[in-house]
Amino acid sequence: MNRLVALLFATLVSSFTLPGAGLAAEPQLGKELKAISPPLASPKDKIEVIEFFSYGCNHCNDFHPLITQWAAKLPKDVSFRRVPVSFNRPEWARLSRIYYALEATGDLAKLDAAVFIAIHEKRVPFKSDEAVVAWAASNGADAKKFSDAFGAFSMQAKLQRADQDASTARISGVPSLAVDGRYLLNNEAVGSYEELLKLTDSVIAKVRQERKGK
């Protein structure tokens, strides 16, 4: 399954330009940004940043430590949310369910990075629901609580909502970042993950100014 996921994501992952690509002083639509229309639902009292990702994506694995550190330092008027997408593929949907189950049981902070490690370093074969539950239990999660959350009736609605948001945002691959439900960042406008996060900071500042102008 790991090889399948890697192969399929190779056709979908967002690309980056060569290092050293310059960023404009203010992000521009059609260049660094793409408009999301209709906009995604977004909180009014916060500037929300969404990361569309999948545990099966090599690029998301590389990006995860950087965006985790970045998100931990966000100002009070900015919130961060992650959306695991499956592109309507069963293999990826199981990985999305892992994220939502860990979130539901309170184990996300403890095992989030461990899922990436299991897939990309240890090559753990998550070929069945039973294999996923067994892995979670072996890594400290309560087997029953995790199993119940993993197979919950509400899980399907969460998966559908995640893929619907990804479709509305018209993302072509992961990781992809959206700000304020209105702006999708163009990965091709930057040369590295660090520049992508700098661009995100610039878009946050842009949204902040737009809100002040209302």
Image (cartoon, grey):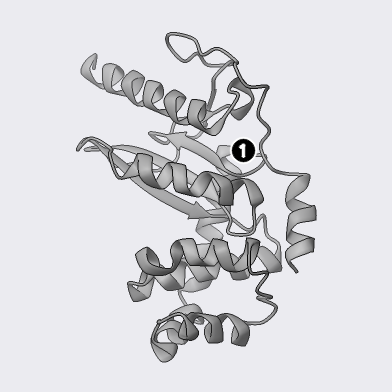
Q: Is residue 214 above or below residue 163?
A: above
Q: Position of residue 60 (x, y in %)?
A: 57, 48
Observer-nearest of 11 and 122:
122
Residue, disc 1: 170
Q: Position of residue 142 (x, y in %)?
A: 39, 87
Q: Is residue 69 above or below residue 39?
A: below
The quarter of the rendered structure image containing the N terminus is bottom right
Q: Residues within 10 Å of mark 1 (few under 14, many from 20)?
A: some
Q: Could you tell whether 205 is left or right of 124 in the image?
A: left
Amino acid under disc 1: Arg
Q: Is residue 165 above or below residue 30?
A: below
Q: Secondary structure at mark 1?
A: loop
Q: Residue furthest top?
A: 25
Q: Residue at x 68, y 33 (%)?
A: 15
Q: Position of residue 213 (x, y in %)?
A: 24, 13
The quarter of the rendered structure image containing the C terminus is top left
Q: Could you tell whether 13 is left or right of 100 in the image?
A: right
> In the figure, residue 143 lies in which quadrant?
bottom left
Q: Residue at x 53, y 33 (%)?
A: 193
Q: Residue at x 51, y 57 (%)?
A: 161
Q: Is residue 37 above or below residue 60?
A: above
Observer-nearest of 51 and 120:
120
Q: Position of residue 104 (x, y in %)?
A: 37, 72
